[in-house]
Amino acid sequence: MELHGKGNPLYNNIEVPKMPFWIGHEGGGTVVEVGKKVHELKPGDKVMSFGWSGTYADYFVSPVKNLERVPDGLDMRIASLGESAGCAMFSAMNSEVNLGDTAVVTGAGFARLVIIQALKKKGAHKVIEVDKSDKKLEMAKETGADIIIN
């Protein structure tokens, strides 16, 4: 099974980064300047970034299609998790886990904790979390994992 490229419809719309490649794809910030053809955003707008935009830098340039306006009042530390939370939800909801299934999730980082919750909501009977960190496993248990394995 081909995971990337033409053989998988989930990846048909993925944009392959061009060189030079600026590191960073999760984040956001405040719009400082917009191009003359940009009408969706204005300087001062808070945005979260979806896509390879070089967000590890103090300033980055991004196509409008890779930005989403942050709702009023939402803390930017939370908004910057929008891309990773979206990817985690996409992964869980497009998994083949069905009502009554048992699922195993490996690694209890932020995205995996979102996946645990989504799999439970999707109907998984048991979600097993495997990680080497007792602290992360405890968070997984609090998040909804039925069984944790170190």
Image: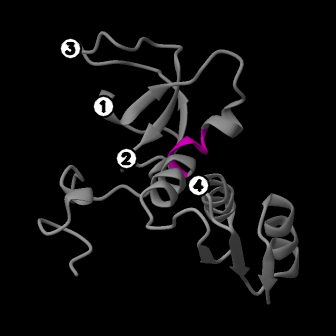
Residue at numbered disc 4: 122
Mark nearer the N terminus (2 vs 4): 2
User: Which residues fall within the magenta stretch?
Assistant: 80-84
Tell me the distance, in whole angstroms, between the alpha carbons under discs 3 and 4: 41 Å
Q: What is the magenta segment's predominant secondary structure?
A: helix
Most foreground residue, 89 or 44: 89
Q: Is residue 10 left or right of residue 77?
A: left
Q: Are marks 2 and 4 in contact (CB under 8 Å)?
A: no
Tell me the distance, in whole angstroms, between the alpha carbons under discs 2 and 4: 27 Å
**Quarter of the image with the N terminus in it:** bottom left
Q: Is residue 40 left or right of residue 27?
A: left
Residue at numbered disc 3: 37
Residue at numbered disc 1: 65
Q: Quadrant of residue 72?
A: top right
Reply above or below: 75 against 87: above
Mark nearer the N terminus (1 vs 3): 3
Label 2 residue SS: loop
Question: Measured from the top left, where is residue 109 in percent x and y?
Answer: 68, 67
Residue at numbered disc 2: 51
